[in-house]
Image: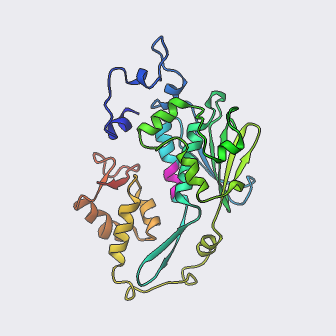
Amino acid sequence: MKIYYEGQGNAITNNFERNLELVMENGKYNYNGYLLADENGMSIKVARYAGTNKVDLLENYEFGYCSLIKATKSVIDKMTVENKRSAKITPKERIEKTLVDATALKEAIINAMVHNDYSSGIPPVFEIFSDRFTITSYGGLPQEITQEDFFNAVSAPRNKELMRVFKDVDLVEQLGSGMERIMSVYDKSIFEFLPNFLRINFYFDKEVLKYLGQTEQDKPNKITEQDKPNKKEEKIELILEFCKVPRSVKEIMEYIELKHRPTFIYNYLNPLLEQEKIKMTIPEKPKSRNQKYIIN
């Protein structure tokens, strides 16, 4: 947590934890301090299913047991990769569209993390179905907030200390801004209000689903190298944009739709490293399996 604070230029004082209300009068950490610690017992999962229900579980990714800040960033990274896109290339521009609105998805993830009622020991859950992303947080709406207040982006944070920390590390801009971004794209129908849970269903864009289901030969707007002389330059621009957060080689290659690893290493990764446009997240261990890359 201190690393994230220092990364935003925030000073770390002797009273750092106390100023953030993460310790009790006896000096021991409270529950928020526990959630933000390097290690804790809170499991945060992203589950993937084969169909539109939970009958056939394909994968279950674990991103918890660490600082809630790190877990949130990991979930955002994972869901961003899963939020696949279609690309339509015209002579003048590249038009991209994702399965769901990327900004709304990110804000919903952050809201679920910040506003979840952790006192029960129940974490938020993130699920990937064949037709939607589903985000479920425990606790429902705070008693003082009606559904009308909720849709009008009236903010009553359940975890004020967590909200402050997330704002300090630039995960949250201001109170209520996340809901405003979601509601600017989607209507009320994506929300489910259950007695003890709040659920959001982001259904996939049908045009993008159709595009992703086609073969390379069937996809529209397929062009040749002759038609696209700046292909490499365009891919480099996409890499730099994608690597604003740490990405693995596999994630980058999937994003720019490149399958041959040696070609990627020789033509893209090594030149960008040499030009210091990107850097390793674990420079002391270049061949680490956890190695990722971020813009410099």
Does residue 295 appear to the left or right of 37 in the view shown?
Answer: left
Quick check: 221 above or below 30? below
Question: Which colour style is shown?
Answer: rainbow
Give percent across and percent down for residue 248. 41, 56
Q: Main secondary structure of the magenta part?
A: helix
Quick check: 244 above or below 173? below
> Which quarter of the image is occupied by the C terminus?
bottom left
Point out the residue furthest to the bottom here.
Answer: 226
Residue 136 makes an appearance in the image: no
Give percent across and percent down for residue 199. 69, 47
Magenta stretch holds residue 77: yes
Nearest the eye: 40 or 3: 3
Does residue 44 appear to the left or right of 279 in the view shown?
Answer: right
Nearest the eye: 273 or 207: 207
Give percent across and percent down for residue 259. 44, 70
Magenta stretch holds residue 113: no
Disc tally is 0
Residue occupying the point 34% across, 68% down:
236
Q: State which region is magenta.
A: 76-80
Does residue 227 appear to the left or right of 201 in the view shown?
Answer: left
Residue 101 makes an appearance in the image: yes
> Which quarter of the image is occupied by the N terminus?
top left
Quick check: 270 above or below 135? below
Residue occupying the point 52% across, 27% down:
32
Give percent across and percent down for residue 257. 46, 71
Residue occupying the point 54% across, 48% down:
178
Point out the residue furthest to the top here.
Answer: 26
Can you tell which quarter of the image residue 231 is in?
Answer: bottom left
